[in-house]
Every structure is written in C-alpha cells, then in structure tokens.
Amino acid sequence: MAKVFVTGGTGFIGSELVRQLQARGDQVACLVRNPTTARELPHLQLPGVELYPGDVCNLESLETAISDHSQVYHVGGATRVHRTEEFFACNEQGVRNVLAVAAKCTNPPVVVQVSSLAAAGVSPSHQPRTEADDCEPVSNYGRSKLAGEQAAREFADRVPVTIVRPPMVLGPGDKVSLAMFRSLKRFGVHIVPSLSNYEYSVVDVHDLVECMLLAAERGERLPANASTCSKSDGTGIYFTTTSEEITFAELGKLIAAGLELRWYRIRRIPEAVSWAVAAINEATRPIRRDPPFVNVDKLREATAGHWTCRSNKAKQQLGLSNSRTLAERVKEACQWYRQAGWV
C-alpha cells in the first residue's frame, strides 16, 4: 500500500486516477481548493481518501500536503482561461511549485507529471510523433505545457520525474467531449470545425491512468542532467494512445454507432466560419462567467494539422496494453453517459 498525493483529483482524469488508486488499496491524498465542496464528489467519499485544502499556484499550501508521500501524480492544470498568463501561472509555475516542495522532502517522491501532446505539436510530415522529436507547440496552451515540462527538468537531479503526454482524452465523466455526444443524441449532428481531414490520436481515460500508474512503478525518469541539456532525447517521457488514428468526422461516426443512432449528419464547417465564432467568443470572454470552449487558441490547434503519436515506447518499457479498440472505448463512454443521464 502506497501513500499517494494527487493534484487535479476533482477533474476528469484525476477522478479516474483516484478511483483506481483507492481500488488497489493505496492511501490517497488530494489537493482541493474547497474541501467541503469537493467532498460531495462520490470518488472523494471513498475510504482512505484524504483532502488537503490548497492550490498548485500557492507554494505554501503544498508544503504540508506533499510530505511523507511516496508518489505524486501532478494532474492539475489549466485548459481554459480568461487570460493567457493564467496558462503559465498554472501549467508552468504550478509544476515548479510541486517539484520544489518534492525536492525538499527527505525521501523525494516519484512524480508523474501529466503534460499533453499539445506540448509537442502537430505531427511533422504526417508521421506520428515520438518522444524524441523536437517540440513545436502551436498554441498558448501547448507552450504553457511545454514550459511545465521544462520546469520539471530543473528538478530532475533531485526528484525522480516521469512525464506522460496524452493526446485527446475521452471517457466516462468527460464534460469537454460531452458536447459532441449531446449534439449527436439530441440533434443528430456532428460538427467538424474544418474542411480538412486531419487525423488525431485519442486515448481513453482508463488507458491513460493505466499508463500513469505503470510510469510511477517502472517508468524512465528524466535524466539528472536534464536542466543543462539543450535538447531532450525523450528519456523520461511517454506518449499514450490507442493504436488507431482517426479524423474528427470518423470520431463522430463512432459516437453515433455507440449511441445506436439510425440517422445523423456530419456537418463540416469552413475554417472561416469557425474563426468567426472563435473571434466572437474571444470578444465576449471578459463578460463570460466561464471561458468559452471554442476560442482562438483552441481553434489554432484544431486547424494546425495532424495530431498523432504512438505508444510504442510505453508498450515496450512499461508493458502498457491498451487492448480495447477505440470503438469499444467510445461505446463504453456512450453507455456511461446514458446511465448517468447526461445524454
């Protein structure tokens, strides 16, 4: 039984991570902004789950929480913000804060940092990315996640750190992709924000968590001299994805099949229209309570090219299985959304 600390435990990926950690008997501590509100979430009511009030952007709140834990899963991060600097405050400085506290521990814990394919960038020459490729992020979000990876490299000589880079993540409980499922279920329409057939890698949240757990147990660590190396060779970094690449239109067809729809339409939107919608959302961002899902930064990613990677390294070194097909995983998500009454 391990003592494990989790940031981002109230989110989509963190929730599944906490459930799997608790199921295998670990003692789990989660950093949460509001323990009273967080305790209402079912997975945080499980036996052996402890809550610590705090924020990755607040260094002092981390100091007591992280000590005495053998593993730290840094899942917390910003994906939608009102201002660009918020990306870097959370995705870069938040990483630096977690690692700085871990480095002070008498026995520094193993840290698994969840980054993103966005940190690496689009697939060069339509070839799925490998961990050793040079990183060329195209969005502010991607640049902030790469900055977080670089922050982790600063502590690699003192803390055992492994970075996991997922592509698009789907699965039960995901509120971001919920819009796709609802659009098909309610209106029989799947919107593709481009006329181009860009391909994407996708990972199910269960498979992503499996990779994270294996990475903590037996993964490579960032090399001790990582902070002084001008270029990374991919040591200590893992992509995780299904074995299939898929277009956004094909993903809509899988969701329609999972929802058992007899009739639906794939509607392609010209990029000019998508950019106009994104521009309107940007203009109204200051008066919105929550940042919009469709924004200039996200559309910059969606129209940049192919977003593909491979899990070869994780399969060879970690024994990652990812045995279920994408169609099976999408069907499982559809069943969960139905049972939960979300679609």
Image: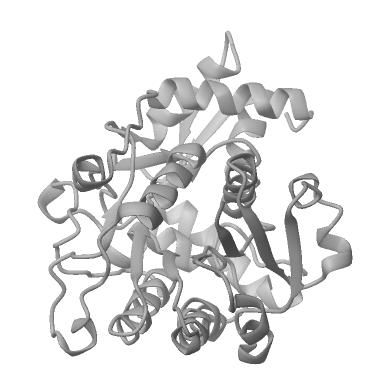
Q: Residue at x 33, y 46 (%)?
A: 240
Residue 193 on image: x %, y %: 45, 46
Using the image as rendered, state which of residue 120 and residue 122 is in the foreground. Answer: 120
State left or right for residue 184 relative to residue 52: left
Along the line of sight, the residue nearer the viewer: 320 or 255: 320
Judge whether 157 appears above or below 70 on screen: below
Report the side of 30 relative to 35 (left or right): left
Image side of residue 319 versus residue 337, left or right = left
Task: Please name whichever residue, 205 or 121, is drawn nearer the observer in this view of the structure.
Answer: 205
Q: How many marks?
A: 0
The quarter holding residue 31 reads bottom right
Give x and y (percent) for residue 231. 13, 78
Tell me, yes or no, if residue 187 can be seen here: no
Viewer can see residue 105: yes
In the depicted structure, whether residue 32 falls above or below residue 320: below
The residue located at (42%, 77%) in the rendering is: 144
- Report the colour scheme: one colour
Q: Residue at 82% of width from left, 71% of height from top?
A: 34
Query: Which quadrant would the C terminus be assigned to in this image?
Result: top right
- Of residue 242 and residue 306, the one placed in the foreground of this image is 242
Q: From the top left corner, tell me how far across and down residue 252 is, in percent.
A: 48, 28
